[in-house]
Each structure stands twice: as C-alpha cells, then as structure tokens.
C-alpha cells in the first residue's frame, strides 16, 4: 500500500458521496441500517481493510485514526492529526453534492480520537436511528459504543464490498492506465532483460530482474511508450514483481522472487501496477527449448482461458469461470493440476476476498466489475522419458508450472481483456524460444577426417551451459574464440596472398590479347580482420552493421560479412507453423544485372565472373520470427540509404564544373554592332544588339 497520497477530484468526491448516501435506501444492501459508521483501522501492506478502502474510494487518501459517518442526508469525515492534510486538502473545500447531500469535515485536535467523546453533531446523526451499520472486524471506539445501543448495530461489511465491487468511470479509467503501464513495463522491462540475459549467457538472479521491473513501474510513462497515461498520474507497483524458474514455482499471488539464478527452462513472470489506488495484474510464461508436452499443455491452458472468458457474463456466478476452465482441461487430463482459485476481483484492494474465482463462490458477475483471471497448471510432472532428449536446462526439470493472468473488465455484452495480448504476448510463437537447437548437418559419410577437423576449427558455435560451471566455461570459451579469430585472420591473409599470386599469373598469360580488359579492380574491404568485427555480433543471427554497410550472415556458425552493394533483393517468404524465413538474392555472373547494380559490383563480376565462384542466394530459417523481421527491416533501410547515396554521387559526377568568371576591366558591356533584321521591320533603321 502506498505511503504517498493521491486525492480525488471534487467532482468524483461529490458523485461518490451522493451514491453512498442514496444507497442507504436499499435495506437489503445494508441489512436495514439507516446510518453507517466506519472507522479506519490498521491496513496491511498491499491490502486494505474495508475502512481504509472506503476512505480511499471517497477521498483518495487514508483517514488514519479517523472515521466516516454516513446518513441519507449527510456524509461526515472525522479527521485526526494522524491524517496528512495534503491528502484531503482538495476535498475539504467541497460542502455538498449536486443532489444537495451535505459533506462535512470534523477535525479533532488529537492523534487518539478514540479517547474523545463524540461531538453533539455526531450524536445527532445517530439519534432516532433504528439500526446503525458498522464493519464487524473494525472495533468501534469505546466512547462511540456508549451512544449506540449494541442491539442496533448490524454488520455492513458485505455492503461496503458491493459498493467497491462495481467501478465507476473514474475507477475504470485508472485501471486502464494501470493495465497499460503493466504491459509496457512487462515488454520494455522484464521481457527485454530476460531475452538479453539468455542471449548473452548473463548470470542474473530473479530478485535482480524483479528490482529492475519494480523501478520501471514508477517511471515516466512516456519513457516506455505508454502515451495514453498522463505524465502526472501516480503509479506504483502493487507487489514486488514475481520471477520464477528452475523448477521451483508458486502460482499464488503471494509468491515471492527468490535469490536463485535465472535458468533457461520455463520462466514465470508476474507484475502488478497500481494507478492512483486501482490495480491491474498480468502474468506470462516463457518457454526455453520446450518439449512437445509443454506446448500441448500451454495450448490447453489457452483454451481454458478462452472458456473462462466466455463464462464471465453478467448475472452468472463467479464459480462458472473455474467450472469452464476445468471442463476444458479435463479433456486433456490436466484438470488435476488446476488450482482451487483461478483469479480474484480487482480494485482498490489488489485481491478482493469477496470475489474469488473458485468453485464455491455464488456471487455474480456485474457490469463494470474488474477481475484478475489467473489460469495455471501447477506442479505438472515431467517424466524422464520425455525430457531425456530435451535441450537446455529443461532436461533437468521434474515438474513444471504454467501461469497466464490478465486484467479483465466485465461489460454488458462480454468480458474484455485490458492487458493487451498484442503487447504482452500469449501466442506460442511469441513465448517460446529455441536457443539450443542443433545445426542441420549434411551427410558425414562423404566428408574426410581432415575436412571434419577444418570445419571444427572454423565453426564458432553458441553453446549454453548449465549449473555452476557456466562462468568457468564462459571464460574458456572467450579465450578459445580469440585464438580462433587470430588463426582465421592469419589463414585469411594467406588465402588472399595466394589468390593475388594466381591472379597475377593469369593476367600475365593473357597479357598479349587482353591488354584493354586487364584493368585494376578495386576489391572492397570493410574490416582489416575478424578482430575488428562489432562486439555485439552473434554467430547465429543475421546482423547489420549500418556504419560499415555490411550484413553478417551466419554460415556454419561463422558470421560472414557481405557488403550491401552485393544484395540484389531481400525478401521474406511466407512463414509456416514451424519457422520464419529470410532470402537474400546476390548479384552473380550469368544473370541480368540491371541498371541498379552498383558500378563496383559490376566491375568485380566482369573481372572475375569467369574465374571465381559466386554465391547467388542465401536462405535463412529461424523459429524466432521477430529477429528475422528486425533484420529484414534493417537490410531494407540500409539498401535504400546506399542507393540514395550512389544516386547522389552519380548526379554530382554529371555536373560540369564552370570555369572561373573574369570581370571585364573597362566595365563596358560587349555589343554586336551594325546588324540589321530580315525582313526589315520598318524602314532601314539600324539596330544595335547587346
């Protein structure tokens, strides 16, 4: 629960006080009470009691040590010195609602109002009231008990819960902001940090990742592209973000991030954001090198989620949501792993205990109510027979949990998800990562032992390690990579020297008849050696170096640089269910080069087209469609920039350089004298032209 104060506007205060006072006409709602008295009580972290929640609802601030008295004609706030005046400053200027219901504030000059007798005004409010409502779990002050007959007291806890259960326009707007912030923090904070840690084999703990996410919850929304949230909105984390991996999972909202290291197996992420008191929640599960059983279980979980959403209809009991999910999971023999509770009501209190989505709750869904729908498969066993061929740390898992949670609003016709799945993705292709795949290998029968040794020395394969040996392996791998780079540079220099020697020999042999064709061709070199490659270069990804205008293509685990001038076309064939594709068509001999071919490329093809081998096409396949999409956009942008630069350079070469103008010394303009026009315009008058 936040220590900061976020007061509501005067208009919201008038509207909510009027609604609360008018609700006393509903005897069923308040157990026949004609007046209400609600003391604040002590709130716990992350949760409000009914007194604190009601004061937050009306004022946007907690009345610590205070009380709220409500009748059909008046709403009175009793304020002690414990209350920060800034939290209720805006409210104190409001004297009545638009319907004429009086709003008043009574300030007590003490931090212990329970020691003072009630004022005459308060006594008058309870006079002649047959029943007075109070919260059973919040003890009335002793001095106040004396003025109310105990037989007249009735419990109104359920009434307050119902008032807070249905949200007004202001509450819905702030929940939308909280949901928008949650998914942006999820995408820009947690997800990117985890992807970076996995890509770079970074050793990081669950707590460290959670701290980064929590810090982002209070950042300026514009920094993480949450443009729909006002910059002055009060945002905070509902709870310390929960990140779990490595086989130890807890799908309850009370779970905690531990100090264990992030593992590359099944990762559960949970995040909650509170905006000016109102909460939103989102949870996702990421799969690293998953086995087929996990994909099947996740598909069943998505189907159960859809069934629960369809069951969340107005006037339907809350128990229908769990029953619908259980029915779907039972078809896949997974219902025994479904938790008893699959969600809860949201609002000022992160977890509304009266609106739990379980099999016994008969409370009904109502329009403009909010829920955290949290579907999970908890502690599903993974037999060794199914994980023995698995890649990565997932092979060591004995049991696993999956969690999928969203913030849901119940509308008149349907239930809608506020935590947009397009930003916080749920599709299998977006939450599954394959980083330990074996490279497709050709038939080794036709490869000699020497060739195999050469291939092993030239390949730089990205290898992920397990357990405590990861750091030691990383250091060894770094030194081996440097050694290989030095060897590659030496081999490259030797190969180039041999190529120059052979070329000079061929040129001398054909020197008699081909003197005109024996031109010097400039061979473009972007990097002196492999040591000068970009540091962030990955051996198994298509990367673009815009500064050098080079595309790095992974070939047998080795990043091979190709200058953008050799890219004829770059296309993305339609992706299938298994993977996405990227095709690079290169300029090569034996084809029409076209008018757009760069001059340097055409010169190299003309000089070496009959002597050397050229690569005509490269096709890349990956299960990570996002990475290929990013590479495709970067290549297209680089091609456009490169062509524009060549066009501008060609236009500048066509310009004729004008000689320096010399001013005439005498200052007289040159003239053409004694010229006549034919036919003569009029008479024989002479004209002078200048």
Image (spheres, rainbow, N blue to C red):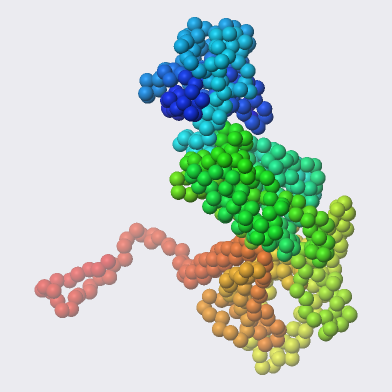
Q: Nearer the viewer, residue 631 or 1?
A: 1
Task: Locate residue 80, reporting x and y percent.
Answer: 58, 13
Residue 444 versus residue 261 in the image, above or below: below
> Which image quadrant: the C terminus?
bottom left
Q: Is residue 193 above or below residue 54?
A: below
Report the front residue among 516 and 178.
178
Residue at (85, 71) in percent of width and height: 457
Q: Nearer the viewer, residue 277 or 354?
A: 354
Residue 451, horizontal then vertical, whole percent: 85, 79
Whether residue 245 is visible here, answered yes or no, is yes
Work out which residue is located at the far left of the displayed protein and give it: 683
Q: Position of residue 95 (x, y in %)?
A: 42, 17
Q: Residue at x 73, y 62 (%)?
A: 293
Q: Is residue 259 above or below residue 32?
A: below
Image quadrant of residue 117? top right
Indicate the quadrant containing the N terminus: top left, top right, bottom left or bottom right.
Answer: top right
Identify which residue is drawn at 57% across, 43% down.
318
Residue 427 location (% of width, % of height): 61, 58
Observer able to see residue 23: no
Q: How many marks?
A: 0
The part of the image, by quadrant, that contains residue 623 is bottom right
Position above or below: 161 against 150: below
> Looking at the image, which residue sits at the far bottom?
513
| Residue pictured at 49% horizontal, 23% vertical | 32
């Amino acid at each position: 629960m936040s220590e900061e104060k976020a007061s509501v506007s005067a208009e919201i205060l008038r509207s909510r006080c009027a609604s609360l006072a008018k609700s006393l006409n509903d005897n069923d709602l308040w157990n026949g009470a004609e007046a209400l008295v609600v003391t604040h009580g002590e709130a716990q972290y992350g949760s409000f009691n009914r007194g604190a929640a009601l004061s937050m609802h009306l004022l946007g601030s907690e009345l610590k040590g205070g009380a709220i008295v409500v009748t059909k004609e008046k709403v009175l706030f009793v304020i002690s010195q414990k209350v920060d005046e800034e939290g209720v400053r805006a409210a104190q200027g409001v004297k009545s609602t638009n319907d004429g219901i009086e709003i008043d504030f009574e300030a007590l000059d003490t931090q212990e109002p329970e020691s003072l007798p009630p004022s005459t005004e308060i006594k008058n409010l309870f006079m002649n009231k047959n029943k007075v409502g109070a919260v059973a779990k919040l003890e009335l002050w002793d001095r106040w008990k004396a003025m109310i007959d105990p037989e007249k007291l009735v419990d109104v806890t359920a009434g307050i819960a119902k008032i807070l259960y249905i949200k007004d326009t202001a509450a819905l707007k702030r929940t939308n902001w909280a949901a928008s912030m949650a998914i942006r923090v999820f995408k820009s904070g947690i997800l990117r940090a985890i992807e970076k840690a996995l890509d770079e084999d970074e050793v990081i703990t669950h707590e460290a990742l959670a701290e980064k996410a929590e810090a982002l919850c209070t950042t300026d929304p514009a920094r993480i592209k949450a443009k729909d949230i006002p910059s002055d909105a009060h945002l905070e984390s509902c709870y310390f973000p929960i990140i779990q991996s490595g086989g130890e999972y807890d799908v309850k909202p009370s779970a905690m991030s531990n100090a264990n290291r992030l593992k590359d197996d099944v990762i559960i992420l949970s995040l909650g954001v509170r905006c000016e008191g109102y909460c939103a929640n989102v949870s996702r599960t990421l799969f690293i090198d998953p086995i087929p059983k996990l994909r099947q279980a996740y598909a069943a979980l998505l189907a159960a989620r859809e069934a629960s959403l369809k069951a969340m209809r107005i006037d339907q009991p809350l128990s229908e949501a769990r029953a619908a999910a259980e029915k779907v999971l039972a078809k896949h023999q997974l219902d025994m792993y479904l938790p008893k509770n699959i969600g809860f009501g949201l609002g000022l209190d992160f977890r509304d205990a009266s609106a739990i989505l379980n099999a016994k709750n008969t409370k009904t869904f109502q329009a403009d109510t909010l829920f955290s729908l949290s579907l999970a498969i908890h502690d599903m066993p993974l037999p060794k027979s199914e994980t023995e061929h698995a890649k990565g740390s997932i092979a060591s898992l004995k049991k696993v949990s999956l969690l999928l949670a969203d913030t849901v609003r119940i509308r008149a016709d349907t239930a809608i998800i506020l935590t947009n799945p397009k930003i916080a993705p749920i599709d299998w292709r977006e939450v599954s990562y394959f980083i330990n795949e074996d490279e497709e290998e050709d038939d080794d029968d036709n490869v000699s032992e020497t060739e195999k040794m050469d291939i092993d020395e030239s390949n730089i394969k990205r290898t992920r390690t397990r357990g405590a040996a990861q750091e030691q392996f990383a250091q060894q791998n770094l030194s081996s990579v440097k050694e290989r780079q030095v060897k590659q540079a030496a081999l490259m220099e030797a190969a180039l020297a041999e190529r120059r020697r052979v070329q000079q020999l061929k040129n001398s042999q054909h020197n008699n008849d081909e003197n005109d064709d024996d031109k010097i061709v400039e061979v473009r070199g972007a990097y002196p050696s492999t040591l000068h490659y970009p540091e962030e270069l990955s051996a198994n990804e298509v990367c673009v170096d815009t500064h050098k205008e080079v595309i790095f293509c992974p070939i047998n685990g080795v990043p091979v640089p190709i200058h953008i001038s050799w890219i004829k076309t770059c296309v993305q064939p339609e992706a299938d269910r298994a993977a996405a594709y990227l095709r690079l068509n290169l300029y090569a001999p034996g084809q029409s080069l076209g008018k757009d071919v760069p001059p340097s490329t055409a010169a190299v093809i003309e000089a070496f087209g009959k002597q050397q081998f050229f690569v005509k096409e490269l096709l890349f396949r990956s299960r990570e469609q996002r990475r290929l999409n990013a590479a495709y956009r970067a290549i297209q942008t680089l091609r456009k920039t490169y062509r524009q630069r060549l066009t501008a350079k060609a236009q500048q070469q066509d310009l004729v350089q004008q000689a320096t103008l010399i001013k005439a010394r005498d200052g007289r303009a040159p003239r053409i004298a004694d010229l006549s026009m034919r036919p003569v315009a009029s008479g024989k008058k002479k004209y002078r032209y200048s």
